[in-house]
Structures are given as C-alpha cells and as structure tokens.
Image (cartoon, helix red, strand yellow):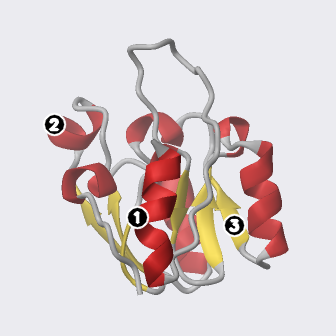
Amino acid sequence: GIAQIKKMLAPFGVEVHAFDLPHFQGPSAVLHLMSVLSPISHSRAVVYEPLAPIRLLEFLRSRNISWLTVNDTEVHTQGANILTVAPDVVVLAAGNPEIEGKLRESGVTVHIFNGENVAVKGDGGPTCLTAPLLRR
C-alpha cells in the first residue's frame, strides 16, 4: 500500500501524502483523489469541496494553494477531473460551463473535448483516460 510507495519513492526525494476518501456512493463507486481535486498550476487547483478530505484542504492551505470550486452538478460530468497539460493550460470535458467560466476568468487556457460517451458514461475524466504520473 501507501507505505510501499513511500519507501519506493523516498530515494528520489519524493514526498508522499495519503488522504482517506469518502465512501460516497458505495463500495462499487471507486473514487480517487483526482475525482475531487485537479491541480491546474503550482499554486492553484480545482476542488469539489463536499468530497475533499479536510486534511487535504488543510494541506493545500499550508502550501498556499488556492482553489476554484466545482458545483454539485458539474462534479457528475467530470468538472473536477481536469487534465493539466502545462501550468494554467487544461483539458476539460464539455458540459461544465460554470467551472469552465471560472477557469477562463482566472486566466487559464481551457481546451474542451466531447466526453459525453467516454468520460461521463464511463465515469472517468481526462486524467482517468491518460493516467498522468509525473508533473513538473
């Protein structure tokens, strides 16, 4: 589990933080952290607060990371699951006008893709479809 990952990454100077995630819609509804939080730069993220662990929000505050919030409707259309391809450059599933507007108003370049048949029906956003491992 997490202890093995920490041990494996420690020689590379990688700091690992673990957060408990909510039960939400039951054991068959698997959530991962990117379902509720998407970093969009080194100092900003998009967060669905109702499912975000308190320790996670405290961690973000301690690192001076601000966030834009996703509403209850758009979290179900992958509005919190955003792929960042460069700082302040993101890929977002179509159908999330509120978070799209917040991102654009804050200076983020937003690329929209039609995720209705893949992301929404498959219950996975662009990060799920690409599984990024390394961020610089």
The numbered mark, 1 or 2, whose residue comes first in the sequence reads 1
Question: Which of these two is toward me, 6 or 17?
Answer: 6
- Give the mark nearer the N terminus: 3 vs 1: 1
Q: Distance between the residues labelled 1 and 2?
A: 37 Å
Image height of 50 relative to 130, above or below? above
Quadrant that contains the N terminus: top left
Q: In front of the other: label 1 or label 2?
A: 1
Residue 33 seen by the camera: no
Residue matched to label 2: 117
How far apart, in angstroms, are the residues tagged by discs 3 and 1? Answer: 30 Å
Badge 1 marks a residue whose secondary structure is helix
Which disc number belongs to residue 115? none
In this picture, is 70 found above or below 60?
above
Q: Which mark is residue 67?
A: 3
- For image coordinates 82% across by 68% down, the residue present is 61
Q: Residue 106 in the image: x percent, y percent?
A: 62, 81
Q: In which quarter of the image is the C terminus?
A: bottom left
